[in-house]
Image (cartoon, rainbow, N blue to C red):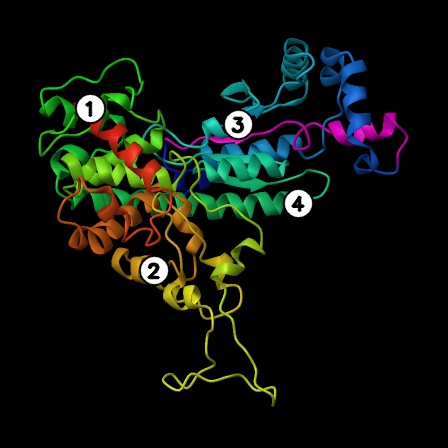
Amino acid sequence: MRAHELLPKNITVFVDMDGVLADLFNHVGAIHDVEHYNKMTPAQWEKFFKDSNAYELFRDLPAFPTANKLVSIVKDFAGGYTILSSPLNFDKAGSIKGKKEWLQKHINVPADKWVFDHEKYKYAVNPDGSPNILIDDYGVNIRAWQQAGGIAIKYQADEDSLQKVFKELKSAAQQAQEVDEGWKDWVAGAGAAAMLAGGGSAAWDAYKASQGEKEPTAITAKAPSDFKKGVDKIAKDAIPKHLVTGSPHEKFLTQAAVAAGIKGEELAQFLGQTAHESNNFKDLVELGGSNYFKKYEPVFKKDKKKKFVMDPKTKKPKNFNSKAVTLGNTMPGDGEKYKGRGYIQLTGKYNYEQAGKALGLDLVKKPELVEKPEVAAKVAVWFWQNRVQAKVSDFGDTKASTKPINPGLKHLDKRKEKFGDFKTAMR
């Protein structure tokens, strides 16, 4: 079996240029006669780019010796690839022209497509919710891509080996296929299987057509004020007639919810809560440093004899952080390891364990799987059906619906507004 057969056909591998294929940074460092380009200050970089002829700079960059080997590996895995490179702010047109000529001169394995865009994260996820793969040297791009739901491989040609790329591509390919197949099986066994098993926008359109509705050409949200004007009643089986956030994640998650039988006012509440939790489906992982996640960490204390204070019930060291106890975090590092992820921001080792058991995934060992759209959708539906549904008799009551998700009712007004937005979209 060739490596690229592991990748679902709809997944694209995007490859960065500067630092990955073209040796921009060492080139600039040599011009400034510094020991290492990292020694250059931000002011020096800015002045250099402003004073440079962008077209000539990018056209004449040296290529890394590994450039063609890298794209050959990628093509073997994916059957092709797309260049995704940021243009220079000071001269977008000139830098793009130079980059195109550089690619034509140095790359022997042509890309399927060239894309020049600063906002790389926009390409992280396909309309059907499946993740694409990015190979990039810049940490900011890597994090943004992952937060958008994609699979990212950090690679800098003068520091990392091609073996690293090969291993991570293989892992990403296997992970993508496992998740893709698991997602299809899950949807196929759910409520609206006949219409949704095909997945993606085609499944969505088929479902809408079956309801006698047509998808509007414009993807725009109606004003929340419509809800305040009296959108009190919607059909029990209503679904949104347009996207509220404009995110493909919204469409993908709506599919999952409808397939599981969540419709009408309950669907509006479900989408409103998940949109709030994930910042309009933009953040599939809770942001913060190690200090931030200490609030989830277990806290153990020692007595005067320097022995751990024991819990008389469990006969184990007593955890003095009640939040960590509730979340099931028992070991140092659990706070960050089991931080909020997915559309519902699943948090805590206990919740990862329970969700994993229900979905047949080892989320305790691989909690990062919940950052993937396919798994995030499964987890959100599982959480809603097992933690929310039984505790809410009226899904028009946002306070009651929020309590099982956020007992402190944090940002209740914003959650109500989101609920209103999605209910309005069902008119």
Residue holding disc 4:
161
- Residue at 39% from the left image edge and 55% from the top image edge: 347
Q: Please give the range of residues in magenta.
A: 10-34
> What percent of the width, then of the height, locates residue 379?
30, 49
User: How much space separates mark 1 and mark 3, taking CA atoms?
Assistant: 28 Å
- Residue occupied by mark 2: 351
In the rendered structure, which amino acid carries the disc numbered 1?
Asp
Q: Secondary structure at mark 2?
A: helix
Q: Which residue is mark 1?
A: 205
Q: Is residue 369 above or below residue 114?
A: below
Foreground: disc 2 or disc 4: 2
Between the residue at mark 2 and the residue at mark 3, the CA separation in whole angstroms equals: 32 Å
- Disc 3 vs disc 4: which is toward the camera? 3
The amino acid type found where label 3 is placed reads Lys
Nearest the viewer among 17 and 250 is 250
Residue tagged 3: 120
The secondary structure type at the circle numbered 3 is helix
Q: Position of residue 59 (x, y in %)?
A: 72, 15
